[in-house]
Image (cartoon, rainbow, N blue to C red):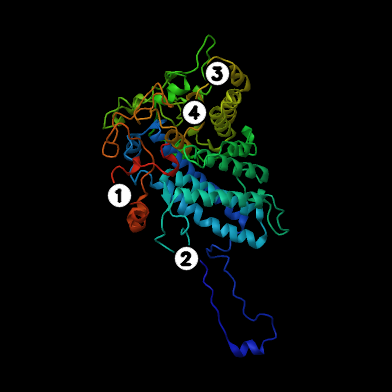
Amino acid sequence: MKKILSIITIAGALLMSSCDKWLDINDNPNNPNTKVPTVDLRLPSIIARFAEAYESGGTRAALIAQQVSGTTANNWNLSRWNITAAAVNWPYQPWYIYTAVNIPDLIEKGQESEAYHYMGAGKIVWAWGFGMFSDLYGMLPYDEAFVGGNMVPKYDQGDLVYERCIKELDEAIAFLQRTQGTSAPALSKGDYLFGGDTSKWIKLAYGLKARMLNHQSKTDKYNAQEILSLLEKAPKTANESALYQYQDRSTSASSSTESLQYQNNASNRVTKLYIDYILNNYLGAPTGGNDLEDPRANYLIPRFVATNMRTPGVNMQEIPDAGFASSIANYAALRPTPNVSTGSVYAKTDAKGLLLTSSEMHFIKAEVLLGQGDKSGALKAYKDGIKDHMEVLGIPIASINAFLASSSVVQDFNLLTISHIMIQKYIALSYSPEVFNDVRRLEYCTDASGKYNESTGVYKGLKRPKAVFSLAFPSDDMWPRRFAVASYGISYNYAQVIAADPDASEAVYTAKRIWWDKKN
């Protein structure tokens, strides 16, 4: 609620008064007001709500990219690539309604008190969220968002949003490098992500820039050397990663919790593809005489407690149009459940949200170096990506070292392929929006014709679902390329949606490539 200022002018009293101010109109601290809260009170909610928006987008990305499959109506729709507005609404709401709308006030309040570190953190979250949502939706309100109470803002295309967001990241770095004013609260008072460590916020900003520039690998804007330079300033170790630690508020198994993946994956189950990738069961996977099982398997693949047997994965090539709700009991739950399922470490009640990790940065480096022909450097970065992900999950160092030295990991740089790198990145970025970005950018497992080809495609085994929504993807060279426009835009801002892209009303809209996903 915006404050309302009452100006009362009583000329005679003003003339007669010897006081500096006979009437001082202030904000009532007991009433809700966007101008009253200090920066250290604003930032925690902004970070928490951003994590909710980001991870909710990640769950939907995981459904489309076949890490998990769902049984509820919306989740099953996403699993079969019926990417409805209803199915992709929720990430949009916590971003626009609960997060982004509050950042301009944070910036304004920070300017007043010279709280430059808060301003820098706010600008990073702003750029992070708008960049991520432009990746998912392709277009969204940016320039006219939150301007002058405009309820029908125009939609901007993702390339413009990227341009604005990269500028915001540069400004954020500059603010974080400044000395705060004497009256400004320490960043540690409101920073629940890095505990006030400005160096980690700066590394995050550089990591986000590297991520966004790497998305542009199909465009003429792609600059491999610039990405490598940014990676030198980005997170390099697991403890520099942006991890949102959720707090378990439960006192019993039925109590509410903070973990987003716990909440989002009540009815979802891991797929056969996801399990195959973890267990190196795909065409061209590393193999040899001293194979070791990936130690992440017991962290990521649920087991039935009663039998100690691993769940089978949902085979998207076998599930009919009706889904697998009637047979869900055959698959162990993603949520750890006493006496029922060991679940996934990502779906624990007090799980960590992996928002941007050093592991991701290493895999970006591996991809870039392999493209430049530096196979030796690419191999090291590939192994570093695996190692750092395992460290974040809490796997013992002895198990990590043994696995990295085994034939389950590529040891000869001459044998390293882009599939090896990207499949490991797929595992390390479980339930992340980046999974959907990568499978699109690397063309799923298709050849130049756009059709599935396991010998030349990158994501071996990632096929169109048997129950694919044929109205949106009528031919076998069509694959998901974006989220549908959220229903808020369709219901209340339709004219601006269609003005930005007339194709938004078409059944095949979610197969339309976004700006950085155009084929060369």
- Disc with the residue nearer the chain's start (4 vs 2): 2
Label 1 residue SS: helix
- 110 up-or-down from 375: above or below: below
- Disc with the residue nearer the chain's start (4 vs 3): 3
Q: Amino acid at mark 3?
A: Asn
Q: Amino acid at mark 1?
A: Ser
- The reply to whether dot 4 and dot 3 touch (C-beta < 8 Å) is no
- Disc with the residue nearer the chain's start (1 vs 2): 2
Which residue is tagged 1?
505
**How many residues crowd around disc 3 within 10 Å: few (fewer than 14), some, or many (20 or more)?**
few
Q: Amino acid at mark 2?
A: Gly
Q: Position of residue 224 (x, y in %)?
A: 56, 36
Of the two numbered discs 4 and 3 in the rendering, the one whose residue sits closer to the viewer: 3
- 424 up-or-down from 221: above or below: above
Which residue is tagged 2?
148
**How many residues crowd around disc 2 within 10 Å: few (fewer than 14), some, or many (20 or more)?**
few
- Disc with the residue nearer the chain's start (4 vs 1): 4
What separation in Å lies between label 4 and label 2 (alpha carbons)? 44 Å
Using the image as rendered, state which of residue 400 and residue 447 is in the foreground: 447
**How many residues crowd around disc 4 within 10 Å: few (fewer than 14), some, or many (20 or more)?**
many
